[in-house]
Image (spheres, helix red, strand yellow):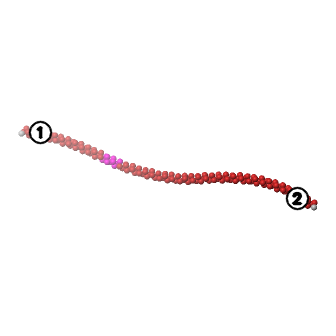
């Protein structure tokens, strides 16, 4: 019975020692796991902070993008308005140019007509000048005959 009690005591001691080692190992494992959990919580907190920073940066980027889009749209509208104004001015100037071309053509036609009229009047003047000269010559001849006839008449009257 002493032997059994000794063996039981020895087994109990071995068991307690083994249990103590396992408890120590479990404590070490628990401490290790707590350290890992603490590290993971730190990493999680860092990740959450980084996530918030990224969300904030994304909001800012989105706001900048929207502002740039608004400015671009305003610029497009201004450009379209300017293009429209320039197109209207170009259309107006084109119309004026066409009118000026028509006016120039009309002036050229009028000049041709005036040249023709001038040539006709010069020809008529030349013909009239010739007739006038011929009439003067005839008048001078008649005047000469009239002078001769008067002289003769005076001679005849004086003879009577």
- Dot 2: within a 10 Å radius of its alpha carbon, few (fewer than 14), some, or many (20 or more) residues? few
Say which mark, if any, is on residue 10. Answer: 1
> The C terminus is located in which quarter?
bottom right
Magenta part mainly helix, strand or loop? helix
Instruction: Determine whether, in the image, residue 66 is placed left or right of residue 33.
Output: right
Instruction: Determine whether, in the image, residue 157 is placed left or right of residue 50.
Output: right
Q: CA distance from mark 1 to mark 2?
A: 199 Å
Q: Quadrant of residue 156?
A: bottom right
Which is more N-terminal, label 2 or label 1?
1
**How many labels, in total?**
2
Q: Is residue 49 magenta?
A: yes
Instruction: Determine whether, in the image, residue 86 is placed left or right of residue 159.
Output: left
Q: Position of residue 66 (x, y in %)?
A: 41, 51
Taking the spot 14% from the left edge, 41% from the top edge, the residue there is 16
Taking the spot 37% from the left edge, 50% from the top edge, the residue there is 59
Say which mark, if any, is on residue 29. Answer: none
Range drawn in magenta: 45-54
Q: Position of residue 153 (x, y in %)?
A: 89, 59
Q: Position of residue 37 (x, y in %)?
A: 26, 45
- Dot 1: within a 10 Å radius of its alpha carbon, few (fewer than 14), some, or many (20 or more) residues? few
Q: Is residue 157 magenta?
A: no
> The N terminus is located in which quarter?
top left
Taking the spot 65% from the left edge, 52% from the top edge, the residue there is 109
Secondary structure found at label 1? helix
Secondary structure found at label 2? helix
Q: Position of residue 127 (x, y in %)?
A: 75, 53
Residue on which the image places disc 2 = 150
């Amino acid at each position: 019975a002493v032997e059994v009690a000794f063996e039981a005591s020895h087994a109990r001691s071995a068991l307690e020692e083994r249990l103590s080692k396992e408890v120590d190992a479990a404590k070490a494992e628990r401490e290790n796991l707590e350290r890992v959990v603490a590290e993971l919580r730190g990493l999680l907190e860092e990740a959450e902070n980084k996530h918030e920073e990224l969300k904030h940066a994304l909001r800012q980027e989105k706001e900048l993008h929207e502002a740039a889009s608004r400015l671009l749209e305003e610029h497009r509208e201004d450009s379209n308005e300017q293009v429209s104004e320039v197109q209207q001015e170009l259309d107006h100037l084109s119309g004026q140019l066409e009118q000026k071309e028509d006016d120039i053509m009309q002036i050229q036609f009028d000049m041709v007509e005036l040249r023709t009229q001038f040539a006709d009047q010069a020809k008529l003047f030349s013909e009239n000048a010739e007739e006038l000269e011929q009439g003067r010559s005839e008048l001078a001849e008649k005047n000469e005959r009239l002078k001769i006839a008067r002289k003769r008449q005076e001679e005849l009257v004086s003879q009577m």
